[in-house]
Image: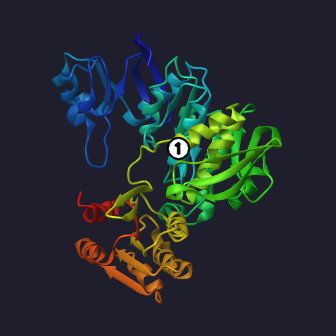
Amino acid sequence: MIMTTSLIEISTPECKGIIPIGYKSAKIDSRAVKKGDLFFAIKGENSDGHDFVGDAFRRKAGAAVVDIRWMKKHGRDHSNFALFGVDDTVSALGELARIHRTRYDVPVLCIGGANGKTTTKDLVSAVLATKYRVLKTEGNLNNHLGLPMTLLNLNKEHKFCVLEVGCSHFGEIRYLCGIADPDAGLVTNIGKEHLEFFKDLNGVAKAEFELYDFLKSKTDAVSFFNLDDSYIRKYSKSIPHERKCTYSYGFEPDVKGTFKGYGKDLQPRFEVTAKGKSFEVQVSTFGKHSIYNGLAAAAVGNHFGIPKAMIRKALKTFTPTSSKRMELLRHNGMLIINDSYNSNPDSVKMGLETMMEAGVSGERHAVLGDMLELGKASTEEHSRIGRIARKLGVRNLYTFGKESLATFRGAKGVSNNFHFESKEDLAEMLRRRIGKGDLVYVKGSRGMKMEEIVNSITGK
C-alpha cells in the first residue's frame, strides 16, 4: 500500500463510514500485525476480530477499522488509539482494496472454475513471471477476504496481477470483480461444486460466469475459453472473436493442444499449436487434470507475448506449493497420491482415471471420503462415483464417511469393496493390504481430513 495516510469516506449499499488509506500493510489477524499496520476487525464463524483489537494495538498497529456499533460500546477502552467505525468491516476491507487497485495501471487476470483453479493460477503466474513481475493469490485465498488482502499487496514494482476467484453462492464472483476490476478472465471448467447452493450444473455455470459477464462490460477485456467444456463453449459463442482467446484439445481453437502421453511420475506431455506454429511442453504437475491446467497456462502465456521457450521452461520447472493438492509421495516402494485437499464428483472421476492410467507393477487402491456440500444430490452423486469406479476397473476400493456409504453400494461388483465408519480401521486394513509396487490414491473433502490416512501409511 502507499506510504502516506489520509482519510476517505466510503458510501456503498453495504457500508458507510470513514477509513484511512495509505498504511504500509493491512491485517485481519492480530498475530500478524506489525508496527504501523492497519488492522481490520472481522467477525467470522469461529472468532471475532473485535476481541483482538487490544492485541493489535499492543503490537503497535497504527489504526483499526471496527464495527461502528462495537465502537460505540467499547471505543472508550481504546481512547488512546485510532479507531474508525464502519457499518461492515468486510465491505470496508473490499472498498479499500478497490481504491488501492485504481492507483496502479496493471493488468489483472482473474481465474475461476469448479476444478483446478488454484493450480491453473499458479501455472499461469509461473509462465507470466518469465516476463513480468507478478502479484498472485497465495494458496487458495480466493474469497471476500483473501482477494482484497492479496490486492492490497499490489505495488509499483508489479507489472501483472493474477487473482483466483472462488464462490459457493451467487453474486460472490460479481462482488470480487467489483473489487479487482479484471482486464482478463478464465474459467477452468464447470463441474459439480457446491450443489447444496447451486442445485445443478446450470447453477454452477451461472455463478462462475459472473466473471465473463463482468468482462463483457469492458471493451478492452479478454476472456479465455476452454472449448472442451460444453457450458464454456456455449457461452464463448456470445463473445466477439477479437475479445476472446480459445483453447482446446477436441475442437479448433486459437490455441490447440494435442496430448502426447505421460512422462515420469504421470507428468503429461502435449503439443501446443498457435498461429500455425507448434511446440511441445511437459507440465511438472501430474495427473489427467494437468493436461487441461497446462494448456490453459500456455494459452494465457501465448496471448500475453511469452516466448514459446519460456512457456516450455516455466511449465517444466514449476514447483507446486499447495500441499495435499495431488501431492505425489513415495514410501517403501509404493506410490501414494494425496489428493485430500478438496473433493467433488468431477475431480474424483478425474483422479480415479489418473490412478487407472498410471503404470504400476502392483495393485491400485482407491481411498475415498465424503464429498461435502452436494445437498440433495449427495446420495446419487456418491453412488455414481461407485459405478464409475466399477466401470473403470478399480479392484480395491475403501470408502469412509456417512455419505460414502452410497459409493460403497454403488460399487457393487468391485472385487475388494470395503466401507468403514472408523478412519483408524480403514488405515489399519490398508496397511495390511498394500505393498511394494502398489499405488494408493486418497481423496476427500477438506472436512474429512483424509490426509490422516496418508500420515498413517507413511508414519508421519
Residue 424 to residue 296: above or below: below
Question: Residue placed at 74% from the left, 31% from the top?
Answer: 220
Q: Residue furthest top?
A: 4
Find disc 1 in the rendering and name its residue.
Answer: 165
The reply to whether residue 135 is visible in this rendering is: yes
The reply to whether residue 88 is visible in this rendering is: no
Classify residue 373 by image quadrant: bottom left
* Quarter of the figure that contains the N terminus: top left
Question: Residue placed at 49% from the left, 57% from the top?
Answer: 265
Question: Residue placed at 43% from the left, 74% from the top?
Answer: 362
**Which of 437 and 421 lies nearest the eye of the viewer?**
437
* Quarter of the figure that contains the C terminus: bottom left
Point out residue 367 in the picture as x, y percentages from the top left corner.
Answer: 38, 71
Q: How many other residues sit within 10 Å of disc 1, few (<14), some (14-19) or many (≥20)?
A: many
Point out residue 239 in the picture as x, y percentages from the top left corner.
Answer: 78, 45
Residue 203 to residue 20: above or below: below
| Three-letter amino acid code of the residue under disc 1 | Val
